[in-house]
Image (spheres, rainbow, N blue to C red):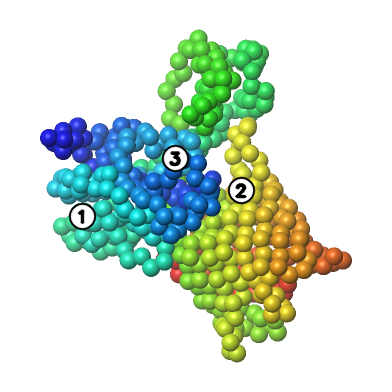
Amino acid sequence: MRLRKWLVENPLRSVSLLMVSGYLGNPASMFGHAILKLDTTGDERDLFDTTINYGALVPPKEPVITYIFKGLFGGYQAGYSDRYFYTQDIVYTNTEARDIWEYKLNLNPEQARLLQLHIWEIIGKKKQYFFLTHNCAYELGRTMDVVMDPPLSQTVYAWYTPAELFDRLHDLDQSPLDSRRSPLIKRIHYHPSAERTLIHHYESLSDRLKLKAKQFLGQPDIKRINITLSDLSPADQQVLLDFLFSYQHFIFTKEQPNPSAQTLSLKHALLMKRLSLPPSPPTDNRVAYRPSPSEEQKSSIIGAGVQTREGGDLVPSMNLIAFAQEPTGRNTLDGGELTVLDLRLNLSPDIPIIDSVDYLRIFHHALSPLPMASRWSWRIQLRSARETNEKYDHQLYFGMGRSKKARRALFYGMLTPSLHALTPIIRIRPEAGMVLPLQRNFRMRLRVGMENNTDEEWRTTTLGTFQYNPSRKFSLQLEYQKEVKSSWRLALRTHW
């Protein structure tokens, strides 16, 4: 009876897989998230559709070190849970400012009903959770295999990220199909984050209204509402109040579950003032579609090419990257970077040498034009690199600076302190750089800085990368780098 009631209350019209973008505020969320959505209304924007989420059962206030250790080594139980889509929208789209891409699948009614019955079986069941392998994306792929042929899941060797699930979905959709079969992906619907929607709203304001918004939000006070609006026409008052209320609602959502009294009172005052004015004419303020990460380049890389060594001779080289969203690649990071485990090998005739290992590289550009948004960009890098004396220097960089977009180019300046295993142990690197997309498939990156090599000397550091990205699966990269030594590298890389 309970099953029959659930089926009646959730008449399934279609099935979607949701791809949630990465979130740098949580180590477990950097690579994104995957959710299954049961469309019971036929409307992608309906917040009362049912979602099926798979995740670890983490106790409240778990220490970060414990969280990472247990997540990596199976210390948590995990299970499926069903919730309304609006709960996912609040957490991901509104609170964490993450984009969502909804992949609506072409399943026939029999497949959809079989999947729905299988979901009834697995809800509430517990499994052992492994962050790198048996995670949300892998388990949802296995769940979908009940109705998928060929299967959506794949063999996992060392890691499995949400991007791989959707890469597989694209590969199956674009593979040669039987003439009797329809494409697997019916359509992709983009749910922009609340922050991206608010930025779009802000950028639609006139310069005068932007200045008014900045002045008011710099000193938000109920008493200043009338002063701010006093010299504006009724139409401009409507436009500005619409934005200020949207902004205050954004702050209200961020502060949940305990919004401040100031936020509540200001939101209420702006609403009352807006209701005293006539309604605005309908407008289409939808955010332009952004390609999902899986519509861009795949996340793992194997590269082979040639590079120079100390004597200037050319030697074969190899590059292996476990996960990469690079500044010069086609991705959704707006010139930023998230790279994990980048291994570079110098295949000299004598003996192969590890030139460097970047365990982690993150570069976040603060580009939001919103009045109260953070203006500080930051980077972190953990690496080991071979010096000219054949010793390896283990390094930790953490920098802060500012970034600015000018048309298509991205410029930044940064001050980066670092810790080293070799002397001097503490170093400082002021640097400036830019990322320039010359066209969709060709990007270049330049970086110039200075670093204290010894207590008496400073050395110039330079990095120039030119990358051609003809498809999701291939790129050609030419790189010049000067740290301890100058070197050129040319590599043809496959993304997988």
Q: Which of marks 1 and 2 is nearer the N terminus?
A: 1
The relative height of residue 192 versus residue 148 in the rendered view (above or below) is: above
Q: What residue type is labelled 1?
A: Val
Residue under numbered circle 1: 146
Q: What residue type is labelled 3?
A: Tyr
Residue under numbered circle 2: 365
For image coordinates 56% across by 20% down, the residue present is 261
Give the crowd class for mark 1: few <14, some 14-19, many >=20 residues within 10 Å.
some
The relative height of residue 425 versus residue 295 in the rendered view (above or below) is: below
For image coordinates 50% across by 61% down, the residue present is 324
Of 95 and 277, nearer the camera is 95
Q: Foreground mark, 1 or 2?
A: 1
Of 109 and 286, nearer the camera is 109
Residue that sits furthest to the bottom in the current view: 350
* Residue 81 in sight here: yes
Q: Do the residues labelled 3 and 1 touch (CB within 8 Å)?
A: no
x and y percentages locating residue 393 in the rendered image? 68, 70
Image quarter (top left, top right, bottom left or bottom right) of the C terminus: bottom left
* Residue 270 in sight here: no
For image coordinates 61% across by 72% down, the residue present is 356
Q: Which of marks 3 and 1 is nearer the N terminus?
A: 3
Of 261 and 213, nearer the camera is 261
Q: In what element is the residue under mark 1?
A: loop
Q: Distance between the residues labelled 1 and 2?
A: 42 Å
Q: Distance between the residues labelled 3 and 2?
A: 20 Å
Q: In what element is the residue under mark 3?
A: helix
Residue under numbered circle 3: 92
Residue 67 bears which disc, if any?
A: none
Q: Earlier in the sequence, mark 3 or mark 2?
A: 3
Q: What residue type is labelled 2?
A: His
Q: Foreground mark, 3 or 2?
A: 3
